[in-house]
Amino acid sequence: MEIVYLIVRHGTGEHLVKNGEIKNLDVGPELTSEGIEDAKSVPQQIDHFVENGVCKYPVMIICSPQARAVQTCFEARKKSNQLKNLPVKIEDVHEITSLLHGQGKIRGDISESSFYSSMSKHDKNLTKAIDNFLKTHKCEPLPDQNNSGLKRANEFLDFCSKSINKHTIIVFCHDGIGRAIINAATGTREDKVMDVGEVRVIHPSKKMAQPKRRKRSRSRSRSRSRSRSRSRSRKKKKKGKLMRSKFLRLMSLQKHMFFRLCTWAAGKRGLRCLQPPGKTQ
């Protein structure tokens, strides 16, 4: 069965605010008040896609272990009872490691975060999922190869296709790894940066089917090559004429300068002044 992915970027974090400080590097950046509002808009976006027939309602949630993604997932689930009832799983869809300098730990201790007490009361399933993940993944992950998350994105898609036979999955992650997942799933490069709290729907089979380019006829290609060669020859001729005119101007200027110098020298010695060619006394 085809898996449809709803890629969700986390809300505005402390690291995205100008002159903002990360409160706890052991936890990593958390959401700001604006970021919490971004997270609360996620259920509305999902409902919009479902109502317009873009995809079916998701049946599972996968979340990054980083604090800002976990908090976005928590706030979205708290806003919607449908999302809160979905099973949740934590996987290594963290941000590309080369983009995380100075942002603290990737697998930080979420129990020290400001939202952990509220999450443990209102969302026990999410709390249990993140606690179990951190118990088995105590060390920091290895750096991504070639500063790209494409390899990890392909591994994530293989994991989903083999172990999760579901129709629609929500992935709470980050901009870099989110676009890497889109690239791996669709086979096309995604250069547009995701907004904070944005949801993108990915249908791998639909995106992979690209329209074939129509082949050009030989006569058309020959006529184009001829026109290009003609334009090049015209440019060369025009450039040659321009260079020739510049050269002639320079030569005439040198001639006049030479005769003026000779006239000055002759006048100093009391001789008859020379005249430039073409002029008579």
Image: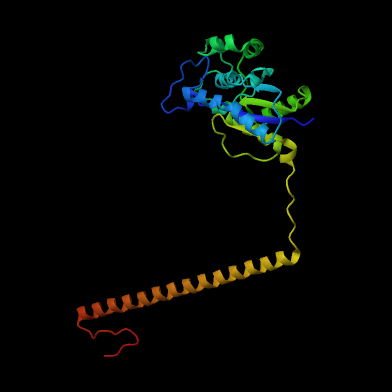
Q: Is residue 108 left or right of residue 133?
A: left
Task: Tell me residue 239's x, y (percent).
Answer: 51, 70
Task: Tell me if residue 138 comes above or below residue 183 in the rendering.
Answer: above
Residue 61 appears at what percent x and percent y?
Answer: 67, 22
Residue drawn at point x = 64 percent, y = 69 percent: 227
Q: Residue at x 73, y 53 (%)?
A: 213
Measured along the vertical axis of the image, is residue 231 above or below residue 102? Answer: below
Marker count (numbered): 0
Image location of residue 177, percent across then percent down: 62, 29
Q: Is residue 112 left or right of residue 157?
A: left
* Quadrant in which residue 105 is drawn: top right
- Nearer-the-camera pick, 233 or 123: 123
Can residue 148 be seen in this snapshot? no
Residue sitting farthest toward the bottom: 281
Q: Nearer the viewer, residue 250 or 187?
A: 187
Quadrant containing the N terminus in the rendered view: top right
Q: Which quadrant: the C terminus?
A: bottom left
**Image side of residue 84 versus residue 266, left or right:** right
